[in-house]
């Protein structure tokens, strides 16, 4: 049974092309801003302030980050407007997307009065959200200016809370949630979005920086070893948050494992899960195979091997993660509706047993992530004690 036939038989509504493009583009914009600003603040900036980092390497990395974020601001601005127009089209009961792009239609949507029972007009919430988007984009686009780049740290730290506000404000409900499950839906939904865009966006920033490094300085390998080490911890936190929130959301929308291949929603969710597992697998290669060798090379002050590992081999694997992450963003617009609804299952209702099982699963996940860190450290010590082969660069590398 193909997807088109399955969609027709179960009532699944395939999103129009403009919806797919605007939603994917919006998440790309969030990855380029939230992911990049968080990664710079948590991984790149502290590494640049470390001892032994040559000023020329630190300055070049800041300049490249500034250029990346300036273009990310442009993408966010464009994607944000198309996403707003998409909201207008969906609220307009059949309004063509082309008509929704008109400034007048957008203005009418943002100034529409509050609905019955709402504590605030939905359009007002989107207005505040897009003001935050404009401010964030303006701060980042300012990094095109040479004078502004002298204050890259300050501008990035200013843009960071503004970029987070873009998605958080949009999630604020205009009406009071009916029960605790609705509140948890909002909390886990935002956790899933923010952790996902930090993970994908951070990987994209670091691969872009490592690929455009030009001629690296003598200690560039040491600098990037520190950056990758710091981001590995950020990525582990994001993986934990993605899986925890994903468990809740999957339980809410999927009533049985078989619905993953008997409903259209389930098929797209299954594809997304497999792509995310691919990202985790690639991250495991770096964590268990390359990071211990990076530690060894750093301890032995083997700068040549360290540069090969951190600036060639490590980014190659990360590029694969980025490709899988982009594929995830392409699938997201198709996750509309619910497998439970398609299959005629009852709606999910939380209970004490559900929360108990969820707590067990989360604790198991936390334990596995903790063991990941400990195992990686143990492998690093073992590699340092017993010489291991350093991957030989290929002619194309």
Image: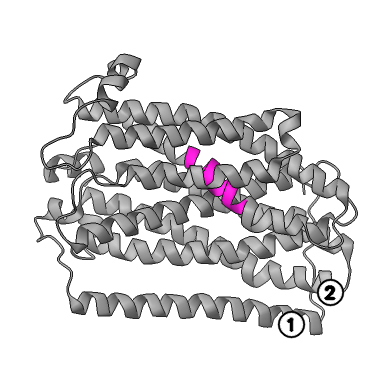
Magenta highlight: main SS? helix
- Residue 89 belongs to magenta span: no
Q: Nearer the viewer, residue 155 or 201?
A: 155
Q: Which mark is residue 337?
A: none
In the rendered image, the vertical position of residue 163 relative to residue 243, given as above or below = above
Estimate the x, y position of residue 96 in percent, counting from the top left: 25, 19
Secondary-structure class at tag 1: helix
Estimate the x, y position of residue 44 in percent, counting from the top left: 69, 54
> Between disc 2 and disc 1, whose residue precedes?
2
- At horizontal 21% and vertical 20% (from top left) the residue drawn is 95
Estimate the x, y position of residue 252 in percent, counting from the top left: 22, 60
Question: Which residues fall within the magenta stretch?
Answer: 29-39
In the rendered image, the vertical position of residue 353 relative to residue 44, given as above or below = below
Q: Residues within 10 Å of mark 2 (few under 14, many from 20)?
A: few
Q: Which residue is mark 2?
A: 299
Question: Are circles 2 and 1 on residues that touch, CB within 8 Å?
Answer: no
In the rendered image, the vertical position of residue 377 relative to residue 316, given as above or below = below
- At horizontal 74% and vertical 63% (from top left) the residue drawn is 226
- At horizontal 64% and vertical 41% (from top left) the residue drawn is 155
Estimate the x, y position of residue 8 in percent, counting from the top left: 15, 39
- At horizontal 42% and vertical 61% (from top left) the residue drawn is 242
Left or right, residue 337 beside residue 379: left
Q: Which residue is mark 1?
A: 381
Left or right, residue 4 beside residue 333: left
Left or right, residue 16 beside residue 72: left
Secondary-structure class at tag 2: helix
Instruction: Give the quarter of the image for residue 82.
Output: top left
Q: In 3D space, how far apart are the residues under numbered discs 2 and 1 (Cα atoms)?
A: 10 Å
């Amino acid at each position: 049974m193909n997807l088109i036939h399955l969609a027709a038989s179960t009532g699944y509504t395939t999103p129009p092309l403009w919806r797919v493009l605007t939603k994917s583009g919006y998440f790309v914009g969030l990855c380029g801003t939230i992911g990049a600003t968080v990664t710079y603040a948590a991984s790149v900036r502290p590494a640049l302030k470390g001892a032994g980092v040559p000023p020329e390497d630190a300055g070049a990395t800041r300049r490249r980050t500034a250029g990346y974020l300036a273009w990310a601001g442009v993408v966010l601005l464009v994607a944000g407007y198309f996403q707003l127009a998409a909201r207008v089209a969906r609220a307009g009961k059949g309004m063509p997307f082309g008509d929704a792009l008109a400034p007048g239609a957008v203005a009418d949507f943002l100034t529409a009065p509050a609905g019955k029972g709402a504590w605030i007009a939905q359009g007002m919430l989107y207005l505040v959200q897009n003001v935050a988007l404009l401010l964030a984009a303006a701060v980042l686009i300012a990094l095109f200016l040479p004078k502004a780049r002298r204050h890259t740290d300050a501008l990035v730290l200013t843009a960071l809370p503004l970029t987070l506000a873009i998605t958080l404000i949009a999630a604020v409900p205009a009406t009071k949630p009916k029960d605790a499950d609705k509140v948890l839906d909002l909390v886990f939904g935002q956790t899933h979005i923010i952790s996902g865009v930090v993970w994908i966006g951070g990987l994209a920033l670091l691969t872009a920086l490592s690929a455009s490094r030009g001629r690296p300085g003598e200690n560039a390998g040491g600098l990037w070893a520190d950056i990758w080490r710091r981001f590995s911890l950020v990525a582990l936190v994001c993986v934990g948050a993605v899986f925890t929130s994903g468990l809740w959301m999957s339980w809410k929308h999927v009533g049985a494992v078989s619905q993953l291949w008997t409903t259209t929603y389930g098929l797209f969710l299954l594809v997304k899960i497999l792509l995310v597992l691919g990202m985790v697998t690639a991250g495991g290669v770096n964590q268990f195979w390359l990071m211990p060798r990076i530690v060894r090379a750093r301890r032995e002050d083997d700068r040549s091997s360290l540069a090969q590992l951190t600036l060639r081999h490590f980014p190659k694997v990360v590029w694969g993660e980025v490709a899988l992450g982009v594929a995830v963003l392409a699938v997201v617009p198709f996750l509309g509706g619910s497998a439970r609804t398609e299959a005629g299952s009852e709606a999910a209702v939380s209970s004490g047993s559900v929360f108990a099982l969820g707590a067990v699963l989360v604790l198991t996940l936390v334990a596995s992530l903790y063991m990941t860190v400990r195992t990686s450290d143990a492998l690093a010590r073992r590699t340092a004690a017993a010489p291991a082969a350093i991957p030989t660069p290929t002619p194309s590398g």
